[in-house]
């Protein structure tokens, strides 16, 4: 599926950059240059490798609540810009903190900045050619002031101008981050999920490895996210000449996601060893002397096992798989290696395990691939312990809050360093 990517904040910028870089490295053609990133702090822009300068939009130039680093040209010598109150994530520190640059982690400031910069946002969005894509995806860290605040304004804007679906990919904060991130993420989920055509969530908590530095952790998580997104949105964009009766197409993905809500992705791979393509093994099988395979290539049991592994793998957002409304299975690999019987039994397994009859399945033939991958999308999942936890954390932070009862509907002049905020979060 051709997809425009719009990254917001540090997380969104890094993930879009990684996506494009992997897209180019794997010879896929998904975004075809339809990318944009928005931020209120330009430091992460400098680390990007694939995003042209005219596609990087720095917001908040004229907004007094936006703090730039001291050496930043546009806010030079700003006293406020000096001495961030915390280490930056990309410095490699182990601490998960919120710094004071950009919008200082405050989504209300983020939303106000975006509203003020709407003309600039609209000019930037003009660079995306909607006729070239089947959908757009907004990518953000939902615990971020820019990701959630600017992201919510951008999502409204994208919905207003695009007729094609607008999806969201949102990263959830980990438990090592300040409570304020959970509160922002809880609000972000509440605002963005109903507005988006579907929202892929990634739980940084489930994907973090205890001892990693924050920067290394984000790199690893971003790699995992991009691998799954490419398997999903890239299916059908590679090797168009390869023949397959059951080729997956973008309509299958749209149909899976059209139920809206929260979606999660499972993924597993099977390395093809020589036996899988071994002519002798094929001959035995043709002569009926091998019970290993049924209709060529990898045996049915292996394919079924691979599909089970994908379902039982660490999902981008762990959840009860039985709560899914629709399921999509994509098997990708050399055209002649995917056992038809394995495919069908795997699909039946998905129906049973997820207790849904709405299981769509297709393959992506990739000549010369050295592995088979199974990608499973579960859409509109509802039983999600991590979201319950984030909401509980947000509610308890809310009830602890004793400070002034300022309105959260955008534009509050809150103290950026104050973690105790009055916000409304439904339990
Ligand atoms: P923003 O720039 O104000 O939106 O804030 P950040 O993007 O720095 O952080 C927002 C949330 O996203 C936090 O919960 C971070 O843990 C998370 N985050 C930041 N960078 C990354 C990243 O590169 N990958 C992932 N998966 N999460 C990130």
Image (cartoon, grey):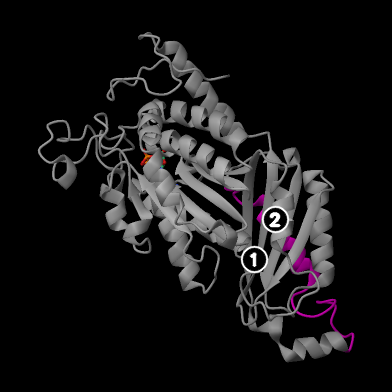
The residue positioned 46% from the left and 43% from the top of the image is 140
- Mark 2 and 1 residues: CB-CB less than 8 Å, in contact? yes
Q: Which residues are magenta?
A: 287-316
Q: Which residue is mark 2?
A: 253
Residue 70, image quadrant: top left
Q: Is mark 1 within 8 Å of ligand 1?
A: no
Q: Residue 224, can we see it? A: yes
Q: Viewer-proximal residue, 27 or 290?
A: 27
- Quarter of image, ligand 1: top left
Residue 346, placed above or below residue 71: below
Residue identifier under label 1: 235
Using the image, tell me which numbered label, if any, was put on residue 178. none
| Near-viewer residue (284 or 185) | 185
What is the C-alpha distance between the residues marked 2 and 1? 10 Å
For the residue with label 2, is its CB less than 8 Å from the closest atom of ligand 1? no
Q: Earlier in the sequence, mark 2 or mark 1?
A: 1
The answer to whether 394 appears left or right of 341 in the picture is: left
Q: What residue is rendered at 40% in x and 26% in y?
A: 179
Q: Is disc 1 placed on a helix, strand or loop?
A: loop
Q: Is residue 213 something one can see in this rendering?
A: no
Mark 2 is surrounded, within 10 Å at the Cα level, by few (under 14), some (14 to 19) or many (20 or more) other residues, namely many
Which residue appears at 50% of the width and 27% of the height? 187
- Of all residues, the one furthest to the right in this rendering is 288
Check the picture and name the quadrant holding the N terminus. bottom right
- Front-most of residues 229 and 287: 229
Q: Is residue 62 magenta?
A: no
Q: Disc 2 on helix, strand or loop? A: helix
Q: Could you tell me residue 96's position as x and y percent?
A: 34, 37
User: Residue visible at 71% across and 42% down?
Assistant: 321
Q: Position of residue 124 (x, y in %)?
A: 41, 51
| Number of numbered discs | 2
* 237 shown above or below 358: below
């Amino acid at each position: 599926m051709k997809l425009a990517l719009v990254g917001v904040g540090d997380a969104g910028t890094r993930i879009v950059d990684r996506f494009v870089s992997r897209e180019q490295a794997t010879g896929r053609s998904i975004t075809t240059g339809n990318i944009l990133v928005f931020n209120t702090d330009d430091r992460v822009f400098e680390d990007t490798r694939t995003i042209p300068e005219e596609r990087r939009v720095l917001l908040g130039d004229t907004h007094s609540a936006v703090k730039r680093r001291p050496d930043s040209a546009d806010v030079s010598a700003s006293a406020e810009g000096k001495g961030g109150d915390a280490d930056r994530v990309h410095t490699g520190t182990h601490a998960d903190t919120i710094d004071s640059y950009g919008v200082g982690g405050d989504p209300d400031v983020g939303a106000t900045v975006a509203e003020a910069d709407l003309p600039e946002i609209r000019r930037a969005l003009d660079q995306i050619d909607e006729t070239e894509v089947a959908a757009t995806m907004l990518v953000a860290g939902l615990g971020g002031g820019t990701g959630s605040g600017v992201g919510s304004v951008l999502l409204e804007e994208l919905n207003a101008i695009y007729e094609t679906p607008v999806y969201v990919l949102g990263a959830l904060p980990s438990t090592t981050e300040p409570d304020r991130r959970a509160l922002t993420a809880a609000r972000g989920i509440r605002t963005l999920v109903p507005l988006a055509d579907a929202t892929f969530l990634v739980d940084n908590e489930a994907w973090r490895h205890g001892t990693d530095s924050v920067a290394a952790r984000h790199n690893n998580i971003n790699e995992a996210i991009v691998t799954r997104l490419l398997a999903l949105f890239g299916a059908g964009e590679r090797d168009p000449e390869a023949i397959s009766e059951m080729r997956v197409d973008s309509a299958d993905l749209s149909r899976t996601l059209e139920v809206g809500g929260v979606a999660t992705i499972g993924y597993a791979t099977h390395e093809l060893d020589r036996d899988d393509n071994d002519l002798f093994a094929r001959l035995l099988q043709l002569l009926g002397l091998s019970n290993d395979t049924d209709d060529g290539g990898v045996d049915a049991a292996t394919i079924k096992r691979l599909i089970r592994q994908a379902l039982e793998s660490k999902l981008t957002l762990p959840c009860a798989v039985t709560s899914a409304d629709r399921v999509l299975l994509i098997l990708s690999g050399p055209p002649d290696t995917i056992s038809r019987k394995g495919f069908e039994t795997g699909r039946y397994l998905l129906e049973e395990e997820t207790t849904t009859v709405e299981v769509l399945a297709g393959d992506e033939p990739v000549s010369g691939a050295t592995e088979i991958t199974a990608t499973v999308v579960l859409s509109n999942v509802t039983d999600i312990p991590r979201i319950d936890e984030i909401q509980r954390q947000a509610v308890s932070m809310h009830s602890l809050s004793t400070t002034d009862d300022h309105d959260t509907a955008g534009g509050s002049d809150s103290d950026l360093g104050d973690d105790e905020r009055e916000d409304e979060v439904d339990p």
